[in-house]
């Protein structure tokens, strides 16, 4: 794997008991590119993100992320990953600002960065409000702020615009969109929108790789077929 390759999978298998949640995934993603992963619920999309995030170990095959082999070199890449999952990974009884300061200490990020990202997601005025008092959309914006707080090289985004109205989605776009300049892996149920921001499209069904091709070579009908 060379220096311009961000992710390389070869025959990746991940099981839950006897069921293969991921069954033989093989792909290469260049640094700076965006992989969008499509498929119905249970297809293996979130499992793939969790393997890349070092939260799950593969049972077979090889996984390299940012030049490091997983899981044995996971320690070397965790600080370079930004994960935005279905769970916001926030402490509900802490304020928005306290949550970000906690994560800033974990990543040894200067305190000023906390205020910078709070402002970027439009939550500076709600920074001293506890998370459980915030709306779902605000919590999602705060989760975005947490994910990018340490300026990660690779973003792992599980339906990142869920719970965001159009104005909020536009607000976080500079942080997690193509303009961020980061390598991204995004799960999506939106064929047209997902393909529009993808460099590489991956289609999963039942854990198997049904398609993997440059996004410009894939149409929405091919994505729609995954759901039938």
Image (cartoon, rainbow, N blue to C red):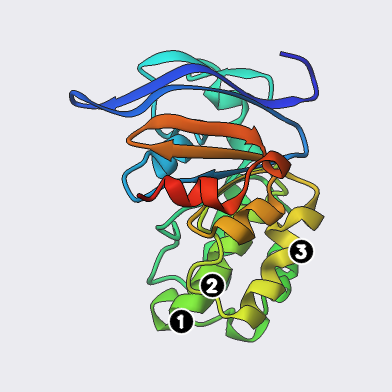
* N-terminal label among 2 and 1: 2
Give me the C-alpha separation between circle 3 and circle 2.
20 Å
Reading the image, the residue beneath label 2 is: 96
Q: Nearer the viewer, mark 2 or mark 1?
A: 1
Does residue 113 lie above or below 21 as drawn? below
Q: Which element carries disc 3, helix, strand or loop?
A: helix
Residue in view at x 72 percent, y 75 percent: 119
Between the residue at mark 2 and the residue at mark 1, the CA separation in whole angstroms equals 9 Å
Q: Is residue 51 visible?
A: yes
Does residue 140 lie above or below 24 as drawn? Answer: below
Count residues near mark 3 (Cα–Cα under 10 Å), then give few for <14, some for 14-19, many for 20+. some
Which class describes the residues within 10 Å of circle 1: few (<14), some (14-19), or many (20+)? some
x and y percentages locating residue 206 in the rendered image: 32, 36
Image quarter in which the N terminus is found: top right
Q: Position of residue 117 (x, y in %)?
A: 70, 66
**For the residues bearing labels 2 and 1, Cβ distance under 8 angstroms:** yes
Kindly identify which numbered label has been placed on residue 174: 3
The x, y position of residue 124, in whole percent, is 67, 80
- CB atoms of marks 3 and 2 within 8 Å: no
The part of the image, by quadrant, that contains residue 22 is top left
Of marks 3 and 2, which one's residue comes earlier in the chain?
A: 2
* Mark 2, other Cα within 10 Å: few <14 / some 14–19 / many ≥20: many
- Element under disc 2: helix
**Mark 1 and mark 3 in contact (Cβ < 8 Å)?**
no
Q: Give the residue pinned by disc 1.
A: 134
Q: Confirm whether residue 149 shows in the render.
A: no
**Label of residue 210 in the image:** none
């Amino acid at each position: 794997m060379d220096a311009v390759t961000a992710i390389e999978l070869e025959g990746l298998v991940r099981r839950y008991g006897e069921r293969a949640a991921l069954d033989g995934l093989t792909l290469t993603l260049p640094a700076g590119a965006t992989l969008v992963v499509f498929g119905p619920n249970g297809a293996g999309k979130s499992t793939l993100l969790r393997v890349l995030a070092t939260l799950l170990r593969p049972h077979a095959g090889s996984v390299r992320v940012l030049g490091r082999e997983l899981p044995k070199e996971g320690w070397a890449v965790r600080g370079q990953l930004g994960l935005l999952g279905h769970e916001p990974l926030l402490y509900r009884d802490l304020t928005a600002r306290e949550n970000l300061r906690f994560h800033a200490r974990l990543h040894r990020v200067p305190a000023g960065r906390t205020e910078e990202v709070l402002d970027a997601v439009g939550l500076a005025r709600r920074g001293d409000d506890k998370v459980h008092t915030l709306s779902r959309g605000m919590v999602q914006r705060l989760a975005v702020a947490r994910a990018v707080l340490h300026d990660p090289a690779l973003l792992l985004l599980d339906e990142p615009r869920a719970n965001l109205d159009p104005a909020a989605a536009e607000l976080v776009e500079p942080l997690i969109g193509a303009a961020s300049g980061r390598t991204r892996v995004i799960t999506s149920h939106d064929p047209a929108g997902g393909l529009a921001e993808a460099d590489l499209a991956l289609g999963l069904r039942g854990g198997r790789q049904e398609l993997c091709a440059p996004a410009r070579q894939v149409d929405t009908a091919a994505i729609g077929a995954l759901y039938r």
